[in-house]
Image (cartoon, rainbow, N blue to C red):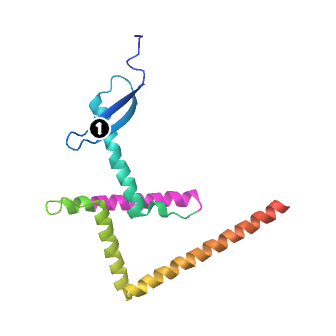
Amino acid sequence: MCLGDELRASHQLIKARNRETGEVKYFIARSNRRVGLRLLLRVGFTRWHMEHLFRVAKDEIGLTHFEGRSYVSLKRHLALCLTVMAFVSRHTTRFRGKKNPEATLEQVCRALRLLCRRYLNRRRGASETQCLLDLLQYHQHRNQAATESHRKRKRKLKRFNTL
């Protein structure tokens, strides 16, 4: 053993087995020898929480709905999604309390979406059917505008390439 070997990073394969369910998980860790097994397992199992948050952000919050073309608008969209995620997380914690300890982020997102939709429909004085038709018309108009924008861009590129 050389001087400093305990500080040098090495790869470790960690096998974690749930005694109740029999489920086995494997982790590959790259750390120095002083890092304990408990810390490595805590970090490994923390990853699930991050994956869950990203899934909720993609499915419920709209993280993947960005259709802009500039970096600034992407940053604004991400900031807005993070703000919504913080809002939903805070309300999920508040709703859990003693009465509803099993409330999830997804449930709170869906409930807030439903409340917002009903509030906006009432404010507009429109029926649910009319709002759905308006939404379909809006998306058709956006798709048509996007298609036209792509055609113009292709025409410009063709002219540029033929010169």
**Residue 132: x percent and y percent?**
43, 82
> Would residue 77 be found to the left or right of residue 13 on screen?
right
**Residue 160: x percent and y percent?**
80, 62
> Would residue 149 be found to the left or right of residue 96 on screen?
right
What crowding class fits label 1: few (fewer than 14 Cα within 10 Å), some (14-19), or many (20 or more)?
few
Q: Residue at x 32, y 68 (%)?
A: 110
Residue in front for this viewpoint, 74 or 20? 20
Quadrant including the N terminus:
top left
| Quadrant hosting residue 143 | bottom right
82 versus 2 height, above or below: below
Q: Classify mark 1: helix, strand or loop.
A: helix
Quadrant including the C terminus:
bottom right
| Quadrant hosting residue 97 | bottom left
Q: Majority secondary structure of the magenta segment?
A: helix
Q: Residue at x 21, y 39 (%)?
A: 19
The region drawn magenta spans 69-90
* 144 inside magenta stretch: no
**Residue 99: x percent and y percent?**
14, 63
**Residue 138: x percent and y percent?**
51, 79
Query: What residue sits right under mark 1 in the picture?
Result: 42
6 versus 115 height, above or below: above
Residue kind at label 1, given as amino acid type: Arg
Q: Residue furthest left?
A: 98
Q: Residue at x 72, y 66 (%)?
A: 154
